[in-house]
Image: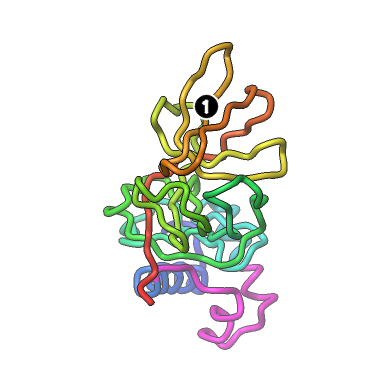
Amino acid sequence: MFGLTERQKEILKYVQEFIDSEGMPPTVYEIGDHFGIKTSSVFAHLNALQKKGFIKRTSKARSISIKEGFGNKKPKSASIPLLRKINAGLPQQSLGMQEDYVSLDRNFFKLGDSSSIFCLNVSGDSMRDEGILDGDTVVVRKDSGNIRDGDIIVALLDKTETTVKKIYSAEGGRIELRPANGLLKTRYYNPDKILIQGKVIGVMRSCK
């Protein structure tokens, strides 16, 4: 870790250990409390670490991630943003703002670059035959370039409505969004009415 001050090395190590143990990065306030320093000092150290290429971060809470290649082992889990509920019945719920974070096992979900992953809560039962039930959380990869017929995707309709469906090419250049529930009808859309948000790569079920 050439080019870092001792305090920057300590903060970098603390962030890595926190991610390994908690499955999510620490907040600026948690770092400050741990080292007994002001949040302004924490921001200064994080900015320096970011400029030197050791970490990535945004203005959101718990957004610190350590770049690979600096002698730090890759954490077994990743902190993934959880967005507001979508509707897996009729497409009526907009893709919302971030609500929380979810800790996911990197190997189990084959996450790779976790910066392209987000989670969404599901309401409705239109995908029940694919094992996606009301109250489940779907794990989604932001990937609109490698979508194939039969993939389960998250789509934004008319720039306002979000749904989870299986996607197929249809006649006349239209797109078919097919539910996995025999009681519901397939719907067809022109390509300019659909913005693919990503491909569903996993499902999590809450045990209550």
Apparent side of residue 85 relative to residue 193 in the rendered image (left or right):
left
What colour scheme was applied to this rendering of the protein? rainbow
Q: Residues within 10 Å of mark 1 (few under 14, many from 20)?
A: many
Where is residue 21 drawn, in percent x and y?
Answer: 35, 74
Where is residue 110 drawn, in percent x and y?
Answer: 31, 47
Quadrant the C terminus occupies: bottom left
- Give the residue drawn at x 38%, y 45%: 201
Apparent side of residue 114 relative to residue 83 in the rendered image (left or right):
left
Where is residue 32 drawn, in percent x and y?
Answer: 58, 81
Q: Main secondary structure of the magenta part?
A: helix
Q: What amino acid is at disc 1?
A: Glu
Nearest the viewer among 207 and 109 is 207
Residue 122 in magenta? no
Where is residue 188 drawn, in percent x and y?
Answer: 58, 27
- Point out the stretch of residues depicted in magenta: 23-45
- Give the residue drawn at x 46%, y 40%: 179
Apparent side of residue 133 relative to residue 184 in the rendered image (left or right):
left
Numbered marks: total: 1
- Label 1 sits on a secondary structure element that is strand
- Give the residue drawn at x 53%, y 42%: 154
Residue 32 in magenta? yes
Which quadrant of the view contains residue 84?
A: bottom right
Where 9 sits versus 121, above or below? below
Apparent side of residue 74 relative to residue 121 in the rendered image (left or right):
left
In the picture of the structure, the residue carrying the numbered disc 1 is 176
